[in-house]
C-alpha cells in the first residue's frame, strides 16, 4: 500500500498553541461550522452546557440554537433525525454522551446510516459524524467506560476512526466532517485533557491512515485511542530493558490502513496489538489475522494481543486490572521477544 | 363494542354491563374467537370520529370540518390512479407466483389511502415510505417497473430520492419516522416553511408512511417527540390496515391510534382510508398546515389489507373470511366508481379506456420484469462508501480474479466482468 500523502493545511493563520484533545475537538467543530453553514452539532446537553466533557463549549452561543441542538434524550432519535438532516444536505455531528449509551441508536446506525449509500447506489449520501467518548479509567458507573468500536468496525458502510492526541483530534474531526461517508468518531475520554502543541498550518495525514509514532527495531506495537499513550509509555520503559519498540497508531479502524504495520512487522518480525476492548472478534483480532496473512514469513513469534477481557466492563474498583496498562503491554513485548 | 373498550381495564361500574358480553383481556398469546369477532366488528366501524366524504355506496356526504373542492377530471384521475396501481399490484403477486419475483408486498385495499395522500403532495415535498407504498410511488412519478428490482433481487431500490421526492423503501419497521422528521427539520431550518410573503407555494413539508404495527416502535415515538419539540413540518400518515402480519391492531394499542397525537401535543385525525376523497381532503389540509409551520400532524387512515402481508404469508391462519367479505363491500375503487356512475361524471368509454390502459401497464410491467438483467458480480461491491474503501476494493479484486479462474477452466462465467 502506498504511503499516505500529507495533506496541505487550511487557510487558518492561528499560531502554534498548546491544546488539549477536548480543545482540539472544539476548535475542529468551530472551524467546520465556520466553513460550512450546513454543519450542525446535535446531542444531549451539547448547547448551553457545552457537553458533559465541554467539547462543544461555547458553540451554541456563537452559532445559535439552530446549529447547535440540545436534543431530546433518545439516541435513536438523535441519529435518526440526523440521518434525515444529512439526506436534506446538512452535515450533522452527533454527540453520544457516553459509549454505553449508543445502543438505542444502533438500529439506525446499522439499518439506515450504514446502508443508505449502498441501497441507493450513491444517489443518497449521508455525511454524518457520530462522536463517541469511549473507554474506561475514569472510575465511572456501568455503561460509561465501554469500548464498542469493534461492533461498528464490523458494519459495512461505516468509517470508524479514533484519535489519540490533540493534533489528530483537531484534524481528524474536520476530515470526518468533510467526508461524504458516515463516520463513527471515537474519542479517548480519559485523555481529553492531555496536552500537545498544535500548529494549525502544519501538514497532516489523511483520515484513513495509520501513523508510526515511534520507530523501533525489536517489536511492533499497534494500537489506537486511549491505549496509544499507554503503549508509548511502555515503549519508553522497554528502552531501559534494551528493547526497541515501534509504536503504530492505527487511527482508522475501518477501513484499516495496515500498510505501515506490515512494513514495520517485516522489519521487527513481532507484533503486539493493544486495545481496551474485549479481545474476541475485535479490531485487534482483525489486525492480528491480516498481519499474519500478509507477513507470515517475516513473523518470528505469534501475533500477541493485550486487551480488556471478555467480560462486561467491571465495577470501577476492578477496572485497573481490566484495562491494559504499561506492565501488561511490557509483558506481551517480553513474551513476543522470548518466543 | 370496540377494542378500545374491551382492552381497557374495566371500571367498577362497567362490570355489570360487561358481564354478559365480556371478552377476555387481550393479554393472552392468541386472540380468542370472541376477540377476533369483536375486532371484526370494531374494524368494520371505525368510530364516530371517522372522516368520510364518500359512503361505501359512493354517495357524497358532507363533514363539518373537512370538505374538498375537486374537479370531475381530478376525480376521474384518482380513479385511474387507483385502477392502475391495483393492476400493477396484482401483476406483482402473479409474477411472484410464477417465480419471477422472490416476494411481493401487496397494497390491495389500500389504494385510496395511498393515492389520497400521494396526490396531496407537491413536487417539492418529500415522502418517506415503508415498503408497501406502491400507490404513493405512483403519485411521485415513480414507474411501477422501478419497484420490481427490490422484489426480484436485482437492487435495493432504483429511483432517485432527490429527483422523485420519495425516499427509498424502508423495510425495518418504523425507522423512517425519525429520518423523515430530521428531513422535515431540515426543510424548516432552510426557511422552506411558513413563508407567507412572495411565494407561499414554495413552502415544503414531509409525509411519512407507516402502519399500525409500526406505531409500537420506539422510532415512531421518537419521531413524534422530535417533530413536536422542533415544530417540524411533517405529516405522520399511519395506514391502519388492521393487521401487522397476524397481529390485530388491538395487540398494538389500547387507544385508537389517531388519539395518540394528543399526547404529543399535535392534531390527530382518523380518516376513512378507503375513501379517496376524504383521504385527499384530510391530507391536503394536513400538508398545508405543515407547510405553514403548524406541523406536525398525525393522520390515521382507517383501511384494510385485503391480501396477505406478503406473498409468503397465509392470512387464512389468523383472520376470518367474514372480515374480508365485510371489507370488500367498502372497496376503495368500487366506491369511487359508484360515485362517478351515480353522478354521471364518467361514461363507459372512460372506464373501458382505464381498463385497457391497465392492461397495457400490466403487459409492460411483466415484460420489464422478465427481461431485467442480472446484476454483474462487481455490483455487489459498488457504492458501499462514497469514498472507495481499500478493503472492499481488495475483496472485489480477489473475487473477480477467483471468478476469472473458472473462465480458464471452461466454466460458464456469463455475467462476470471478464
Image (spheres, rainbow, N blue to C red):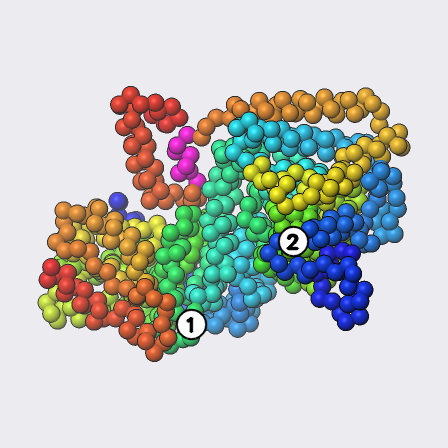
Helix, strand or loop at mark 2 = loop
Q: Position of residue A172 (x, y in %)?
A: 38, 57
Helix, strand or loop at mark 1 = loop
- Check whether the beta carbons of the residues at disc 2 and disc 1 lie within 8 A of each other: no
Which residue occupies 87% across, 40% down? B60
Which residue occupies 21% across, 71% down? A327
Is B334 above or below relative to A170?
above
Which residue occupies 27% across, 28% down? B405
Residue beneath label 1, please? A142
Q: Position of residue B180 (x, y in %)?
A: 61, 51
Residue beneath label 2, please? B31
In the drawing, what numbered circle is on residue A308? none
What is the spatial separation of the Cα atoms under label 2 and label 1, in whole angstroms?
41 Å
Pointer 1 chain: A
Q: Position of residue B95 (x, y in %)?
A: 57, 28
Is B331 above or below relative to A68?
above
Viewer-nearest residue: B305 or A295: B305
Is B413 above or below relative to A192?
above
Does residue B326 appear in the picture of this structure? yes
Q: Position of residue A19 (x, y in %)?
A: 37, 70
Pointer 2: residues within 10 angstroms few (<14), some, or many (20+)? many
* B232 sits left or right of B159 in the view: right
**Magenta region:** B376-383
* A179 sits left or right of B218 in the view: left
Q: Main secondary structure of the magenta part?
A: helix
Amino acid at each position: 500500500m502506498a504511503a499516505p500523502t500529507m495533506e496541505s493545511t487550511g487557510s487558518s493563520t492561528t499560531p502554534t498553541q498548546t491544546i488539549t484533545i477536548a480543545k482540539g475537538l472544539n476548535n475542529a467543530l468551530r472551524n467546520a461550522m465556520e466553513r460550512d453553514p450546513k454543519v450542525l452539532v446535535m446531542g444531549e446537553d451539547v448547547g448551553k452546557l457545552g457537553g458533559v466533557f465541554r467539547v462543544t463549549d461555547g458553540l451554541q452561543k456563537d452559532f445559535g440554537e439552530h446549529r447547535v441542538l440540545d436534543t431530546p434524550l433518545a439516541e435513536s432519535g438523535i441519529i435518526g433525525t440526523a440521518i434525515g438532516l444529512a439526506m436534506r444536505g446538512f452535515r450533522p455531528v452527533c454527540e453520544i454522551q457516553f459509549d454505553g449509551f449508543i445502543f438505542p441508536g444502533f438500529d439506525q446506525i446499522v439499518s439506515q446510516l450504514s446502508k443508505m449509500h449502498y441501497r441507493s447506489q450513491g444517489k443518497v449520501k449521508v455525511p454524518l459524524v457520530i462522536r463517541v467518548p469511549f473507554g474506561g479509567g475514569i472510575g465511572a458507573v456501568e455503561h460509561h467506560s465501554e469500548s464498542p468500536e469493534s461492533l461498528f468496525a464490523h458494519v459495512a458502510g461505516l468509517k470508524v476512526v479514533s484519535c489519540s492526541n490533540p493534533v489528530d483530534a483537531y484534524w481528524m474531526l474536520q476530515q470526518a466532517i468533510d467526508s461524504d461517508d458516515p463516520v463513527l468518531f471515537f474519542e479517548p475520554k480519559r485523555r481529553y485533557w492531555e496536552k500537545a502543541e498544535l500548529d494549525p498550518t502544519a501538514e497532516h495525514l489523511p483520515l484513513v491512515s495509520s501513523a508510526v509514532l515511534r520507530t523501533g527495531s525489536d517489536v511492533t506495537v499497534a494500537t489506537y485511542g486511549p491505549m496509544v499513550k499507554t503503549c508509548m509509555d511502555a515503549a519508553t520503559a522497554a528502552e531501559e530493558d534494551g528493547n526497541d519498540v515501534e509504536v503504530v497508531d492505527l487511527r482508522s479502524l475501518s477501513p484499516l490502513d495496515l500498510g505501515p504495520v506490515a512494513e514495520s512487522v517485516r522489519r521487527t518480525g513481532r507484533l503486539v496489538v493493544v486495545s481496551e476492548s474485549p479481545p474476541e472478534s475485535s479490531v485487534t483480532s482483525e489486525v492480528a489475522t491480516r498481519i499474519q496473512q500478509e507477513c507470515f514469513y517475516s513473523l518470528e513469534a505469534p501475533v500477541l494481543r493485550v486487551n480488556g477481557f471478555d467480560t462486561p466492563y467491571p465495577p470501577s474498583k476492578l477496572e485497573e486490572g481490566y484495562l491494559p496498562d504499561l506492565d501488561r503491554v511490557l509483558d506481551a513485548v517480553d513474551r513476543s521477544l522470548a518466543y | 363494542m370496540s377494542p378500545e373498550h374491551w382492552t381497557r381495564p374495566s371500571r367498577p361500574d362497567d362490570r355489570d354491563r360487561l358481564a354478559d358480553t365480556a371478552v377476555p383481556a387481550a393479554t393472552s398469546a392468541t386472540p380468542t374467537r370472541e376477540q377476533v369477532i369483536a375486532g371484526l366488528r370494531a374494524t368494520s366501524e371505525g368510530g364516530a370520529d371517522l372522516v368520510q366524504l364518500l359512503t361505501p355506496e359512493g354517495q357524497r356526504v358532507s363533514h363539518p370540518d373537512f370538505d374538498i373542492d375537486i374537479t370531475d377530471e381530478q376525480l376521474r384521475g384518482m380513479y385511474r390512479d387507483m385502477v392502475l396501481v391495483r393492476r400493477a399490484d396484482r401483476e406483482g403477486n402473479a409474477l411472484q407466483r410464477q417465480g419471477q419475483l422472490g416476494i411481493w408486498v401487496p397494497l390491495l385495499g389500500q389504494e385510496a389511502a395511498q393515492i389520497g395522500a400521494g396526490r396531496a403532495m407537491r413536487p417539492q415535498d418529500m415522502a418517506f415510505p415503508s415498503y408497501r407504498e406502491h400507490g404513493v410511488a405512483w403519485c411521485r412519478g415513480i414507474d411501477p417497473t422501478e419497484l420490481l428490482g427490490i422484489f426480484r433481487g436485482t437492487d435495493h431500490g432504483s429511483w432517485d430520492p432527490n429527483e422523485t421526492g420519495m425516499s427509498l423503501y424502508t423495510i425495518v419497521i418504523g425507522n423512517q419516522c425519525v429520518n423523515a422528521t430530521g428531513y422535515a427539520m431540515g426543510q424548516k431550518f432552510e426557511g422552506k416553511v411558513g413563508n407567507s410573503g412572495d411565494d407561499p407555494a414554495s413552502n415544503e413539508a414531509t409525509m411519512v408512511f407507516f402502519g399500525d404495527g409500526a406505531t409500537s416502535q420506539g422510532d415512531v415515538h421518537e419521531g413524534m417527540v422530535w417533530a413536536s419539540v422542533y415544530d417540524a413540518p411533517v405529516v405522520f400518515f399511519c395506514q391502519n390496515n388492521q393487521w401487522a402480519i397476524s397481529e390485530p391492531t388491538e395487540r398494538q394499542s389500547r387507544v385508537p391510534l389517531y388519539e395518540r397525537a394528543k399526547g404529543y401535543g399535535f392534531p390527530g385525525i382518523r380518516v376513512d382510508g378507503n375513501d379517496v376523497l376524504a383521504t385527499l381532503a384530510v391530507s391536503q389540509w394536513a400538508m398545508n398546515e405543515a407547510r405553514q409551520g403548524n406541523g406536525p400532524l398525525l393522520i390515521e387512515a382507517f383501511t384494510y389489507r385485503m391480501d396477505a402481508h406478503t406473498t409468503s404469508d397465509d392470512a387464512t391462519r389468523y383472520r376470518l373470511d367474514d372480515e374480508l367479505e365485510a371489507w370488500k363491500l367498502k372497496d376503495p375503487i368500487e366506491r369511487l366508481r359508484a360515485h362517478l356512475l351515480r353522478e354521471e361524471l364518467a361514461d363507459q368509454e372512460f372506464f373501458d379506456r382505464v381498463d385497457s390502459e391497465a392492461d397495457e401497464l400490466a403487459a409492460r410491467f411483466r415484460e420489464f420484469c422478465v427481461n431485467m438483467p442480472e446484476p454483474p458480480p462487481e455490483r455487489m461491491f459498488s457504492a458501499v462508501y462514497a469514498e472507495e474503501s481499500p478493503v472492499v476494493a481488495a475483496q472485489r479484486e480477489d473475487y473477480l480474479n477467483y471468478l476469472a479462474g473458472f473462465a480458464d477452466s471452461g466454466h460458464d462465467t456469463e455475467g462476470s466482468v471478464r
